[in-house]
Amino acid sequence: MRIAILTFDGFNEIDSFVAAYMINRVGLPGWKAEITCPTPAVESARGVRVSAQQPLELVREADAVLVGSGRLTPRLVEDGALLSRLPLDPRRQLVGSQCSGALFLAKLGLLDALPACTDRQTRPFLEASGVRVLEQPFFASGNLATAGGCLSSQYLATWVLWRLAGRDAAEQALAYVAPVGEESEYISRALRAVGSFIDEPTVAAAAWQR
Amino acid sequence: MRIAILTFDGFNEIDSFVAAYMINRVGLPGWKAEITCPTPAVESARGVRVSAQQPLELVREADAVLVGSGRLTPRLVEDGALLSRLPLDPRRQLVGSQCSGALFLAKLGLLDALPACTDRQTRPFLEASGVRVLEQPFFASGNLATAGGCLSSQYLATWVLWRLAGRDAAEQALAYVAPVGEESEYISRALRAVGSFIDEPTVAAAAWQR
């Protein structure tokens, strides 16, 4: 599984790195979440310079793409050349956005009639593009998900892990990153936030057997 | 206020960036948390390459130093030349550690008879150096603090903010990074984890007036 964490100039460090780190905890062979950028290096809103691990072209073959957030997103989504390098396709890959990343999904026509989650700063921009914004940290429909508030990146990672590696893998990653002694609180909150958006075969089977 | 986030090769992205980002949310003039490294660039355990924002020498003048965590810490703390570049001094600055960063505090003789927090992987190493490890995410005594579990970095940042900029600044940073709709839950949990280690003049005054 290859997972692209799209990261642009002006990016928010929490938004890109919490998801990347959690997804990489799985450690299965060939399983990799990578910081994916339009240029060889990008600089965060606070001046942290990070080298790209993959070029934007990874989007084409990635099993999941998470669009990170940043201060420059409202301007970046007006860049037609950049948008043309983002052939996101929820029919063949998971697509998620963190905070202002939802503006990319809206601009690419992926949100359609769906409501979405985003951070409070981005909310008016997303609403201006006709999207109904939810007062909750996470929403998903099929292969598309949106999350709002930096630390909801843990829910976006939980969704990707649950969908691609199973619920146990998601729980293990959550247990690893949770504050010591708060593991079960973090796990149950994340499973609650994400669980109602997962069609789990085992759950369906269990219900059917009743 | 200048805050050094010590970040070494093999570092854990969540541990360095959650604290740096939250502390930088304060946005007061001259207030800055920076990724501080022994070399011009460092590479995380998962291959993310980051440029140093400051050299290790910032430690000497920083108002607060947070020692990040990483896969290579047990080896790094045996490097005498590196340790000599870390004149951490809790008499004149706040000193905190995240996960395996506690091994640096132990090696530098700063933990003395104090118990400490760390992650579950580092726990046996820290215990082997004679430190009592607590089953909780955060502990502080005076100007020294330790945190365990990647996302307890939010508590370490809360402690620095509360101590250097006041409780309101800490609450604002927590509200900003919390998942949408979970702000009050995140704020009250963090204030609970950190609050008992803060001597707050206003709290003391209120108690005195009763």
Image (cartoon, coloured by chain):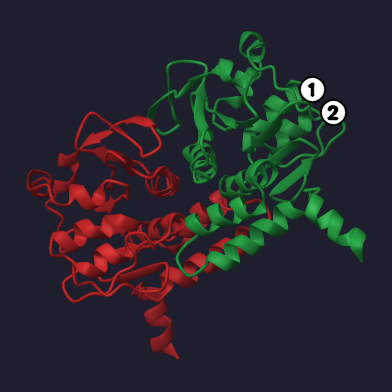
Chain colours: A green, B red
- The residue lying at 52 percent from left, 27 percent from top is A7
Q: Residue A83 lies in what quarter of the image?
A: top right
Is residue A106 placed above or below B185 in the rendered structure?
above
SS class of the residue under badge 1? loop
Q: Secondary structure at mark 2?
A: loop
Above or below residue B118? Residue A111 is: above
Q: Residue at x 35, y 70 (%)?
A: B139
Total labels: the figure holds 2
Q: How far apart in space, not on screen, are marks 2 and 1 (Cα)?
A: 6 Å
Residue A166 left/right relative to B204? right
From the viewer's perspective, tell me whether residue B207 is left or right of residue A150: left
**Screen quadrant of the C terminus of chain A:** bottom right
10 Å crowding of disc 2: few (<14), some (14-19), many (20+): few
Of residues A159 and A124, the one drawn nearer to the viewer in this rendering: A159
Q: What percent of the width, then of the height, locates residue A161?
A: 63, 45
Q: Residues within 10 Å of mark 1 (few under 14, many from 20)?
A: few
Question: What kind of residue is marked 2?
Answer: Asp
Which residue occupies the extreme bottom position in the image?
Answer: B210
Q: Residue at x 47, y 38 (%)?
A: A13
Q: Does residue B36 lie above or below B161 as drawn?
A: above
Q: Chain of mark 1?
A: A
Q: Is residue A1 above or below residue A77?
A: below
Q: Are marks 2 and 1 in contact (CB under 8 Å)?
A: yes
Q: Is residue B53 left or right of residue A172?
A: left
What number is the disc on residue A112? 2
Give the quadrant of residue B93.
bottom left
Residue at the spot of label 1: A109
Which amino acid is tagged 1?
A: Gly
Q: Is residue B123 visible?
A: yes
The residue depicted at 44 percent of the width and 30 percent of the height is A44
- Tell which subunit mark 2 falls on: A
The answer to whether residue B30 is seen in the rendering is no
